[in-house]
Image (cartoon, grey):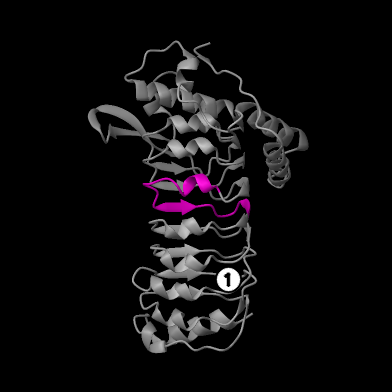
Amino acid sequence: MPFNLPIMETSGLPLLLLLLLTAIACNSHALTDAEVAFIARRQLLSLSKNVDLSDDFEFDVKVDYQFANPRIRRAYIALQAWRHAMYSDPSNVTGNWVGPEVCNYNGVFCAKALDDSSVDVVAGIDINGADIAGYLPNELGLLTDMALFHINSNRFCGIIPKSFSRLLLLYEIDVSNNRFVGPFPIVLVGLPSLRYIDLRYNDFEGPLPSELFDKQLDAIFLNSNRFTSGIPENFGNSTASIIVLANNNLGGCIPSSTGRMGATLNELILLNNELVGCLPMEIGLLGNATVLDASWNSLGRCLRISVDCLALLISPSLTTTLMWKMVSA
C-alpha cells in the first residue's frame, strides 16, 4: 500500500454528542442507520484528542510515491485521507484520486504557489453536486495553499475540523446543502483571507458569533440552519454586500447598527426568523440596498424610516414592495 495513516484517539464526550447529532442529520438524507453509524464511527476514529493535527503529522504518514514537491506530497496525504473518509461516491467522481499526480484528480485545481512561482500547489477543490457521503478529516488542514473549497450539494456529515485553522489562504468556502452539525464553526472566523462563507442548508445551531460581523467578508450565507439567540449587536460592522440569515430561529430585534452598512450592503434577507419589535429607523440609511426582506416575522408597523434614504432603489414601486415585505407576517 502506498498510503498508511496512523489511527488517532477520540476526543471525548462532546465529540460523541456531536456525532450523535450527525447520525440524526445524515439519516434525513436517505442513509440507512447502519451507514450513518459507520460514517460517524469513522470520523470518531480520525480525530485526535485536541481535534487538530500535530505539527509533524505529515512525517508520521508513510508514502511510497515520489512527488514534484513537498506541498504536493501533503496534498496527496490530505486527499487520500478524505477519500478514505467517503462512504459513498455514486458518480465515481473520486475514482481517479489515485497516484501522486494530484493535480489531475477530478475536482482538484492546481496553480503556482503565491510565494514561489516555480512550485505547483493545490489551490482549489470543487466537487459541488457530487452526492458524496462522508466527513471532512483532519488531514484537510494540510492543504495550506488552498484558496477555494466548494463541496455544496453532497452528503457530508459531522463537523468542520479544527485543522481548518491552518488554511490561511482560504478565500471561499461553500459547504452548503450537506448535513453538518454543531455550533457555528468558529474556526472559520479566524481565517485571515476568507471573504465568502456559505453554510446554507445544514444543521448548525446555537448563537451566531459576534466576531463574524467584525470580519472583512464579501458575502455571508447562513440561511436554513438552526441558529438562535438573536442577531449580534455589532451586526452593522459587517462589510458584506449580501447577507442571508433566512429560515433560522434567531428571534429578538433587528439591531440599530444595521444602518452602518449603508455603503456596502446590497441585499439583506432576514425572513422567517421569529424576529420581533419594530424596524429600526436606521434601516433608512441603507441607500445602496436593492433587496431588503424581513417578511414572515413578527415585526410591528411602527415604520419610522426615511424613504428618501432609499432613493437608490430601482423604482418607487420596489420601495413600496420592500416596506410591505419587511412588516408582513
Q: Which residue is mark 1?
A: 271
Instruction: Work out which residue is located at the far left of the displayed protein and give it.
Output: 117
Residue 135 at what x, y percent from top left?
Answer: 59, 36
Whether residue 255 sits left or right of residue 248 in the image: it is left
Residue lying at 48% horizontally and 66% vertically, measured from the top left: 235
Residue 92 at what x, y percent from top left?
Answer: 54, 31
- Can you say which quadrant of the picture contains the C terminus? bottom right
Whether residue 309 sits left or right of residue 134 in the image: it is left
The kind of residue tagged 1 is Leu
Residue 70 at what x, y percent from top left?
Answer: 35, 21
Q: Is residue 40 above or below residue 329?
A: above
Label 1 secondary element: loop
Image: magenta residue range: 185-205
Residue lying at 40% horizontally and 77% vertically, measured from the top left: 286
Whether residue 103 sits left or right of residue 98 in the image: it is left
Residue 218 at what x, y percent from top left?
Answer: 38, 58
Q: Which one is in front, 203 or 232?
A: 232
Mark 1 crowd level (few <14, some 14–19, many ≥20, 10 Å Cα): many
Q: Is residue 44 above or below residue 242?
A: above
